[in-house]
Image (spheres, rainbow, N blue to C red):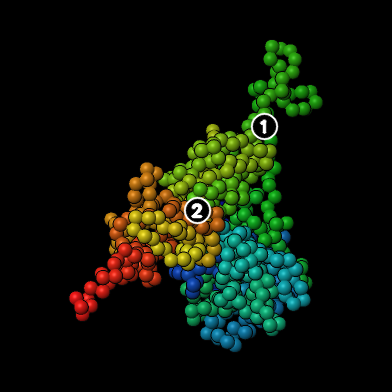
């Protein structure tokens, strides 16, 4: 999503500058608690490790970037008069109550933190628009879930599922949840029961506000100290623009607020990830920016003449007669954006479940159809598009979308890149990281338990069959090597004892290129014994570390204990009576 990031960076720079200006304007009044933000927008503490766990509370999810009105401070007993945004100072009743109760709880439990409820209000503003303008029930729970984008690494952080979808409904990746937009892994540590109902619910404003307060106060922070305040805000989202935006709202709310009915709060409409329609997932889709109308081509006075009725300019018909409709002016492509491609991960030999798709967008953010998009696989990989090709060209549809053919993983594990670029346009390409994962197994076990015994020079009656698993699940298609080893401590191939046969019938004591089947099973070829009796070892190893050592015995059959009719101790039928009595006294 390179072009989207580029746009976001340029836009972010402007927003950060505006935020810095807002804080500077408020600071000019010498209002208490105003922090100093340098000209470049980098506030104190921005380089610090932001959170106790090393990650942000929200997984650095998108946030609302709307700023408060720039105005002169007014006494905190009144509501600021912000013209068209006069109601920006109005906080929904239940939401405001939750912030103030969280402040009281923290003042009692952690008085050294000095948490102002206005900081919770500032964070609540940029995270959920004060829980969508106060759309909560009587207990403080949101009427509808507020979920951030899927954190799958496409434009956002990549956080695999940590809660089995219990909070965010996604069992593959995590998503920020609720009024204060906690990711499930952070909520598992910091979740609170702020309304005393016995439940810790990130969708409840009382629970979420108290959890946010405790999170901000972590590590013994004193939020009346500027450096600690900055560290706390950055621990929520590791962005200087985010810091500046929260600080601007903090100081705005410190100048005065008033209560408004639940559901009547002002909804923000500018998010950090909505430069283009369809890019990112808004917690409040109905208030996402609308696509701008396409600019109409201006007439060229040099190619036509104005009609008497003031109509549009028309070109002169070629040859002096007939009419000619000019070719439509092609719309230039300003950017390519990810059109919903998820994680590109597949096991060796498999087809990727996700197909790479992009959308061509104009400068105004509209979809551009009939654009040729070239998809290319690059890197040290044998992955190919369907048909065995590294590159393919696809034309965008009426919605500006182009989808590449299915991508097939090769036998080589590793990372590679799929690039999409607009053919004939200067728009920056989009790069997708992809990964082919080796098939592995961590455990091998025999499916039978019969002893493996053979007489010298003969064939073993039993064939060795094993089952491979990875973390308890069937491991199919896993490469396997089988070797007749010298000893338990020497894994080199033996030069005597049992052996397999190659295609020519010659003895071999190492087999490679074996793979487990769809059910994780593998039956080894038949084994044979040479003339060397003894106990030998067969070692079977899988990709991923699964190892099994099997004992093989080559031994002659035990003699029969029952005397046979030809035993030398039995009298011979042809012996004369005198032979059996040759030891008599008369001799």
Rendered position, 487 above or below 202: above
Q: Which mark is residue 298?
A: 1
Residue at image position (53%, 45%) is: 408
Label 1 Cα crowd, 10 Å radius (few <14 / some 14-19 / many 20+): few
Front-most of 34 and 243?
243
Residues at circles 2 and 1 in contact by the CB criterion of under 8 Å: no
Counting from the top left corner in percent of width and height, residue 447 is at 50, 63
Residue that protrudes farthest toward the right in the picture:
309
First-in-chain label (2 vs 1) = 1
Q: Badge 2 is on which residue?
A: 477
Left-right relation of 548 to 58:
left
Residue at image position (75%, 68%) is: 143
Left-right relation of 282 to 517:
right
Q: Nearer the viewer, mark 2 or mark 1?
A: 2
Front-most of 253 and 309?
253
Dividing the picture into quadrants, the one containing residue 562 is bottom left
Residue at image position (68%, 77%) is: 206
Front-most of 312 and 386?
386
Question: Dot 1 lies on which element?
Answer: loop
Counting from the top left corner in percent of width and height, residue 265 is at 73, 67
Question: Dot 2 lies on which element?
Answer: loop
Residue at image position (54%, 63%) is: 473
């Amino acid at each position: 999503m390179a072009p989207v990031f580029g746009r976001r960076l340029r836009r972010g720079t402007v927003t950060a500058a505006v935020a810095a200006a807002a804080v500077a304007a408020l600071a000019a009044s010498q209002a208490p608690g105003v922090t100093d933000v340098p000209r470049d927008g980098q506030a104190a503490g921005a380089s610090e490790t932001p959170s106790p766990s090393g990650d942000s509370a929200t997984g650095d999810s998108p946030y609302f970037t709307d700023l408060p009105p720039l105005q002169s401070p007014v006494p905190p007993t009144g509501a600021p008069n912000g013209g068209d945004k006069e109601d920006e100072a109005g906080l929904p009743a239940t939401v405001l109550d939750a912030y103030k109760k969280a402040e009281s709880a923290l003042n009692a439990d952690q008085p050294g933190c000095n948490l102002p409820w206005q900081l919770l209000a500032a964070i609540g503003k940029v995270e959920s628009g004060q829980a969508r303008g106060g759309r909560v029930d009587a207990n403080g729970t949101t009427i509808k879930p507020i979920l951030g984008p899927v954190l799958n690494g496409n434009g956002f952080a990549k956080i695999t599922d940590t809660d089995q979808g219990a909070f965010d409904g996604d069992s593959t990746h995590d998503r920020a949840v609720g009024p204060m937009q906690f990711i499930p892994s952070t909520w598992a540590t910091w979740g609170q029961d702020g309304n005393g109902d016995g439940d810790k619910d990130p969708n409840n404003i009382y629970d979420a506000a108290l959890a946010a307060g405790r999170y901000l106060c972590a590590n013994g922070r004193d939020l009346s100290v500027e450096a600690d305040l900055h560290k706390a805000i950055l621990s929520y989202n590791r962005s200087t623009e985010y810091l500046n935006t929260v600080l601007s709202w903090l100081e705005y709310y410190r100048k005065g607020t008033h209560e408004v009915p639940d559901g009547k709060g002002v909804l923000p409409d500018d998010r950090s990830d909505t430069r283009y329609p369809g890019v990112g997932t808004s917690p409040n889709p109905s208030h996402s920016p609308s696509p701008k109308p396409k600019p109409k081509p201006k007439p060229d006075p040099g190619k036509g003449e104005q009609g008497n009725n003031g109509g549009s300019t028309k070109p002169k018909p070629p040859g002096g007669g007939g009419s000619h409709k000019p070719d439509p002016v092609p719309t230039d492509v300003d950017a390519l954006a990810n059109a919903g491609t998820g994680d590109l991960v597949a096991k060796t030999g498999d087809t990727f479940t996700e197909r790479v798709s992009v959308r061509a967008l104009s400068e105004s953010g509209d979809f551009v159809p009939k654009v040729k998009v070239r998809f290319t696989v690059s890197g040290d990989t044998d992955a190919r598009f369907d048909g065995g090709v590294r590159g393919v060209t696809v034309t965008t549809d009426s919605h500006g979308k182009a989808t590449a053919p299915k991508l097939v993983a090769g036998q080589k594990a590793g990372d590679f890149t799929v690039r999409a670029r607009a053919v004939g346009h200067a728009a920056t390409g989009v790069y997708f990281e992809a990964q082919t994962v080796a098939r592995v197994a961590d455990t091998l076990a025999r499916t039978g338990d019969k002893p493996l015994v053979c007489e010298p020079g003969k064939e073993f009656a039993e064939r060795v069959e094993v089952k491979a698993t990875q973390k308890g699940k069937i491991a199919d298609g896993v490469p396997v090597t089988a070797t007749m080893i010298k000893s338990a401590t020497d894994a080199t191939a033996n030069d005597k004892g049992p052996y397999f046969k190659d295609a020519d019938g010659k003895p071999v004591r190492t087999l490679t290129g074996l793979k487990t089947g769809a059910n994780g099973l593998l039956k080894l070829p038949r084994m044979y014994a040479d003339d060397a009796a003894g106990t030998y070892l067969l070692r079977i190893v899988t990709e991923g570390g699964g190892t099994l050592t099997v004992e093989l015995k080559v031994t002659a059959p035990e003699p029969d204990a029952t005397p046979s009719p030809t035993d030398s101790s039995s009298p011979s039928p042809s012996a004369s009576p005198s032979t059996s009595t040759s030891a008599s006294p008369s001799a």
